[in-house]
Image (tube, rainbow, N blue to C red):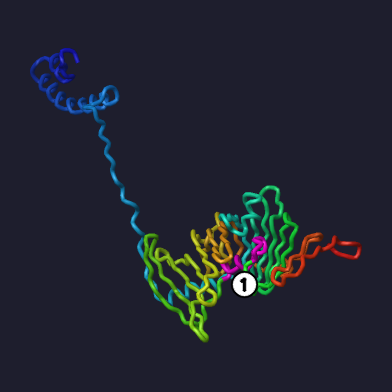
Amino acid sequence: MPGGKSIGSWLAHFADGGPKRLHVKKLECMLTPTLAAISCALGAMLAGCGGHVVTRTTRIEGAAQPVAREATREDLVERYNLVARGVQTLNLTVELKPTAGSQYSGVIQEYHEVKAFLLLARPANIRVIGQVPVIGKTAFDMASDGETFRVSIPSKNKFLVGSVAVTHTSDKPIENLRPEHILEAFLWPEIRKEEEVLFEEFNDESGRYYILTVLRGGYRTEILRKIWFDRSDLEVSRLENFGPKGWLESDIRLRDWRAFDPSGIGPAPAGAALTTFARAITIDRPHDDYRLELEVNKITLNDPIPAARFALEQPPGSELVHVDDGQTPQQNPLPGKDQKP
C-alpha cells in the first residue's frame, strides 16, 4: 500500500471523527487479520510468504467395524440348512471372469468375456452353456449328472467325457474342466443330525466370523467342510470342502447377499423360506489350478426343469476324449442319411 499503510489505516485516514471513526476502527480490527492471511497466500504464490507454504493434513479415521451379531451353533446350523433345503432347482444367468492360470482361461479369455447360462437341479444335475456376448457364439457346453461329466469345446473341436469320481489332474489343462465344481457352490449338502459339528469364533482385520466345522467319521475323524458366517449379517461368506487327509478340494467365497426383488434378482417364489442370494461367487480349487469368479445377474428359483435340458450329446465331427481311461481320441462322424444330428 502507498506509504506502507495498511488498508485499515487508509480507511481510518478517510473516516471523519465520532461514530464513523469508531466504526472504521472496528472494521480495521476485523480486516487486518483477514487481509494478512490473504497477503500471505498471494505472497506465497508470487514471491513466497516467509519462503514457505504450510500444508495441513487432517486424518479421517476409517469407518467403524459393523456390529457383530450373536448366534449359537444351533442357530447357524438351521440358517445354513434353510439355504440348502430352499434351493432345489436354479436357472441362472452369470458373467464368468477367469483369473490368471485358471483352466478356464484358455477357453474364456479367447473371447475376453463369457456370459453363461446355468441349470441346476438336485441331487447333482448341472448344465453350463458359455456364450460370447453379442454374437451368441458358444464358447463351451458342459453337463454332469453326478456320475459322468461331458464337456464340449467347439473352438477346440473336442468333446470330453469322464467320471466325476476321477481325482487326478491331467497335464492337458483343457481336460480339467468340470461342471460339478460349479454345482457345489450352489447346491449345498444339508448338515445331517448325526454329523458332528464344531463351533468357533474367528476375528481378523477383514471382519468377525463364526465357523462351523463338519467332521467326517470312520476309522479316523477328518474335516469334511468348514462353513464361515460373517457376523455382520450372519450370511454364509465362505465354504471350504476337504477330501481325505485334509486335502482342500475347494474354497468358495460368497459376497453381496441381496434380497429377492423385482429390480435385481427377481421376486422370491410364493411361500419360499429363502429370501436372499449371493450375487458374487469365487470358486478356487488350488490342486486343479482352477479359479473362477461368477457374477449372478438373473435367477429363477425352484421352477421345474425338464431332464432333457441336462442332456449333452457329442457334436458331429468333434474329437472324443475319454479323460479318465486313456483311450485314443475318436472322431464322431458327421450324421449320414440314417443318423440323426
Side of 53 where 172 appears, left or right: right
Side of 273 where 165 appears, left or right: right
Side of 55 where 8 appears, left or right: left
Q: Is residue 85 visible?
A: no
Residue at 10 percent of width and 22 percent of height: 22
Residue at 38 percent of width and 71 percent of height: 201
* Disc 1 secondary structure class: loop
Side of 231 where 180 appears, left or right: right
In the image, the segment drawn in magenta is: 170-187
Quarter of the rendering occupied by the C terminus? bottom right
Q: Categorize mark 1 by other alpha carbons within 10 Å: few (<14), some (14-19), many (20+).
A: few
Residue 240, placed above or below residue 317? below
- Residue 16: name its quadrant: top left
The residue at which mark 1 appears reads as 167
Residue 302, placed above or below residue 194? above
Residue 42: image x %, image y %? Answer: 27, 24
Residue 199, placed above or below residue 62? below
Furthest toward the bottom, the residue is: 219
Residue 227: image x %, image y %? Answer: 47, 71
Please check the rendered image and state whether residue 188 is part of the magenta-colored stretch, yes or no.
Answer: no
Quarter of the rendering occupied by the N terminus? top left
- Give the camera-side residue of 151 and 312: 151
Residue at 63 percent of width and 63 percent of height: 91
Q: Is residue 321 visible?
A: yes
- Give the camera-side residue of 63 and 111: 111
Q: Amino acid at mark 1?
A: Thr
Residue 29: image x %, image y %? Answer: 14, 26
